[in-house]
Amino acid sequence: MKAMVLEQPGRPLVLKTLADVPPGPGEMRIRVEACAVCRTDLHVIDGELEHPKLPLVPGHEIVGVVETLGDDADPSLLGSRVGVPWLGFTCGHCIYCRAGLENLCDQPLFTGYTRDGGFPTHVVADQRFSFGLELADDPVAVAPLLCAGLIGWRALKKTGNAKRIGLFGFGAAAHIIAQISVWQGREIYAFTRPGDIQAQRFAIGLGASWAGGSDEAPDVLLDAAIIFAPVGPLVPTALRAVRKGARVVCGGIHMSDIPQMPYSILWGEREVVSIANLTRADAREFFPIARNAKVKTHTVVYPLEGANEALEDLRHGRLNGAAVLVP
């Protein structure tokens, strides 16, 4: 099989021909149809997330068709379309798993980080940590839902019943969650890089009530904010934008340092919380909601060998929506 491989953090991916890997017990070998490119992939490739499996095939927003099954795998999966997300395995016995908090497992495996992911032509995955998809689904359109959608949904749930929600960083996750929020009757306030008029127009086109740079502010206080951009200085910015009793949700797995800030902008029972990974229950909730809300993902397609170009476009903010690799 062919794969884009990370040999050392900080270096471009390399196109290689690798030996086919047979599925083990409870696993399935999947022919990859599409894999979206996530900012977490950048964090792994740049070395901001430490101790990746090396060499590593990145990618964790995978859609594909099951071609081969290992022992003890469900035979009904053969020939079906499945999605494979970031969370690739949990131990099942630590205090977090026993409490239903598998996203906080002490001994997890993560797709495209500590086990090979979705930037090859074929990938092996644990059937328990994959999601059934309809054969009629468009693989390219569905791929961003496997992380941007799921993490966005988990972050949105943390805002409770907030009516006015600020989204800081209007990329793949925000453009999905904005659509769901508008469908739910909420108001979205989109904060982009200063001067990014194209992203602001994109947000308004998806139903946002207001869009501007992170150096601007709407004329109302917000009920909650979600920070998708991995930029620590946005935390005090978001706190200044929300009302008393509001919550600021940090939706990324990595963020630059939060700067020193005055206690006064936190006071008033404002809260800052983080989102870690996802659970399979999140997927069971999210996919029906995404269908009912008629979420339309905006994608830019790259061939597998164009992975480095896709990563650079993501790094420099040249995308509206999500990049998707198609082997």
Image (cartoon, rainbow, N blue to C red):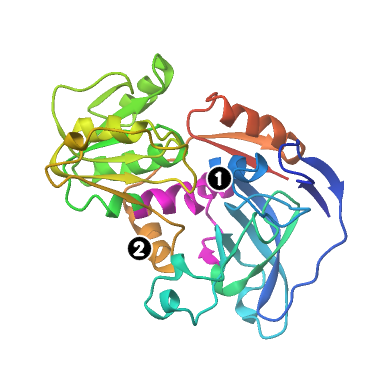
Residues rendered magenta in the picture? 130-154
Magenta stretch, overall SS: helix
Instruction: Give the labeled residue for mark 2.
Output: 285
Q: Residue at x 75, y 46 (%)?
A: 6
Closest to the observer, 311 or 6: 6
The question of residue 321 being in magenta is answered with no
Tell me whether circle 1 and circle 2 mark residues in contact (CB < 8 Å): no
Q: Residue at x 61, y 40 (%)?
A: 42
Q: Say which quadrant the N terminus sits in.
A: bottom right
Closest to the observer, 153 or 267: 267
- Mark 1 and mark 2 lie on one chain; the one further toward the N terminus is 1
Q: Which mark is residue 40?
A: 1
Coordinates of residue 147 in the picture (x, y in percent)? 49, 51
Q: Say which quadrant the C terminus sits in.
A: top right
Q: Residue at x 58, y 63 (%)?
A: 82
Q: Is residue 88 above or below residue 210?
A: below
The CA distance from mark 1 to mark 2 is 23 Å
Q: Residue at x 52, y 44 (%)?
A: 141
Coordinates of residue 121 in the picture (x, y in percent)? 76, 52
Q: Which mark is residue 184?
A: none
- Mark nearest the camera among 1 and 2 is 1
Residue 217 sits in which quadrant? Answer: top left
Q: Amino acid at mark 1?
A: Thr
Closest to the observer, 38 or 198: 38
The question of residue 131 being in magenta is answered with yes
Q: Amino acid at mark 2?
A: Glu
Coordinates of residue 299 in the picture (x, y in percent)? 53, 35
> At numbered mark 2, what does the secondary structure look like: helix, strand or loop?
helix
Mark 2 Cα within 10 Å, few/some/many (few <14, many 20+)? few
Coordinates of residue 251 in the picture (x, y in percent)? 39, 46
Closest to the observer, 135 or 191: 191
